[in-house]
Image (cartoon, helix red, strand yellow):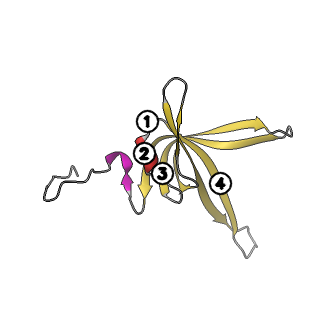
Amino acid sequence: MELTGRITADAQVTNLKDDRQVVHFSIAINDSYRRKGDSENTNLTTYFNCSYWKGTGVSGFLKKGQLVQLYGRVGLNVYNNTSGEAKGSLTFHVNDLKLIGGNSGNIHAAPTPAAAGDKEDLPF
């Protein structure tokens, strides 16, 4: 599945007990629609809590407001709040991601700065 949205807060790296690390961030996806016979659009924002397990180096690129395109799978986290009400949140398990705008491109292929006067052939 593919999602495109804006990051709502800077990404955080979480260290787990078994020495693994995961990058956590959330995105907001804005949508609008117009009901039949209605003259105004209705705006809808959907939030996803995201996790990325393939490396923590991406966390430096995942800043609040950055537009990202994510590939992975959706999950649902269901729980009861302190009042006993059933609640839920959408999760997204990210397999791959791309930054859109500004530093656009696949962040796994982000080039390292070349030395002055150094000419490198690009692989594309």
SS for callout 3: loop
Give the x, y percent position of residue 80: 80, 36
Q: Earlier in the sequence, mark 1 or mark 4?
A: 4
- Give, as a three-letter code, the residue at label 4: Thr
Image depth: mark 3 or mark 1 in front: 3
Label 1 sits on residue: 54
Label 4, label 3: how far apart the Cα atoms are: 19 Å
Label 2 sits on residue: 58
Give the x, y percent position of residue 33: 67, 65
Label 3, label 2: how far apart the Cα atoms are: 7 Å
- Give, as a three-letter code, the residue at label 3: Leu
| Mark number, residue 62 | 3
- Residue at 60% x, 55% y is 28
- Residue at 48% x, 26% y is 19
- Residue at 61% x, 48% y is 48
SS for callout 4: strand
| Mark number, residue 46 | 4
Q: Earlier in the sequence, mark 3 or mark 1?
A: 1
> Tag 4: Cα neighbours inside 10 Å, few (<14), some, or many (≥20)?
few
> Tag 1: Cα neighbours inside 10 Å, few (<14), some, or many (≥20)?
few
Label 1, label 4: how far apart the Cα atoms are: 25 Å
- Give, as a three-letter code, the residue at label 1: Lys
- The residues colored magenta run 105-109
Image depth: mark 1 or mark 4 in front: 1
Q: Earlier in the sequence, mark 2 or mark 4?
A: 4
